[in-house]
Structures are given as C-alpha cells and as structure tokens.
Image (cartoon, helix red, strand yellow):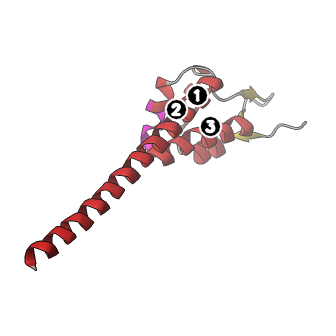
Amino acid sequence: MFEEWISAKEACKLLGINYRTLWRWATKKGWIRFKRLPSGRIKYSRKDIERILKIFYGITYKINIPNENIDDLLSVYKGSEATLFNMIRKIENKLAELSRKINDIEQRIAKLEKFMDYYAQTILE
C-alpha cells in the first residue's frame, strides 16, 4: 500500500503549528513519522498527521479547548495511541454523565416551576 508523504509546510498548515513544533513532534515525541529524501528535504507521513488531527482536534472540539493549547494536551499524554484512545473514551463518558446530570437538573427545575405556578395560583384564589 502506498503511503503519502507531505512537505513540512503542508504538514504545519494542516496541523496549525509551526516548523519547530512539527520537528519536535516528529523527532522527540515520535508522533509523526518522517523520512529524509536524497535531496536532504524532509517529508512527513500524511497518515500520522491525519491521525493526530482526528484524535486531538476531536478532543478539543468536544471539551472546547482552544487550538493553541493542543501542544500542552499532547505533552501530558505521551503514552501510546491506546492510552490516547482510553483518554478519549474517559472524556466522552464524563461528558455523557454530565449531560445526564444537566438533563436531570432541567427536569427538576421544570417540576419546581410547575409547583410554584400551582402554589401561586392557589394562594391568589
């Protein structure tokens, strides 16, 4: 199967990061595979970049983290991809739990408002 390799400029544009961050993610963190061409130019794995976009931008969208804080998020979770997916699953579960709690509170408020309306009408009559 053919793997697509892209330039640093294109990789940075896709990820919304600068060259130094791209190089750090590729060399020190190992999150993006790269290869050096005979000409000396470096190409980066599009597949790895798309994986990062899918994972991290998905997380930041769901929990509303600004894009400029993604590098901080990445540095906290240096583990394997499995660890990252576990983190995503935990965040999604927590969001679902909070959503259920919010729904329950909204239902209780609606019941309380009905009771207050009934009580107010009873007193005024």
4 left or right of 41?
right
Where residue 30 appears, as percent x and y from the top left, is 63, 22
Residue under label 3:
52
Q: CA distance from mark 2 to mark 1?
A: 6 Å
Classify mark 1: helix, strand or loop.
Answer: helix
Q: Is residue 71 magenta?
A: yes
Residue bearing mark 2:
90
Whether residue 51 is in magenta: the answer is no
Query: Badges 3 and 2: C-beta atoms under 8 Å apart?
Result: no
> Residue 11, position in %: x, y?
64, 42
Which kind of residue does numbered mark 1 sit on? Asn
Residue that carries the numbered disc 1 in the rendered image: 86
Residue 120 at what x, y percent from top left? 14, 71
What amino acid is found at the position of numbered circle 3 in the picture?
A: Ile
From the viewer's perspective, tell me whether residue 38 is left or right of residue 30: right
* Residue under the point 53% across and 45% down: 16
Q: What type is the residue that disc 2 sits on?
A: Lys
Provide the residue span drawn in magenta.
Answer: 68-72
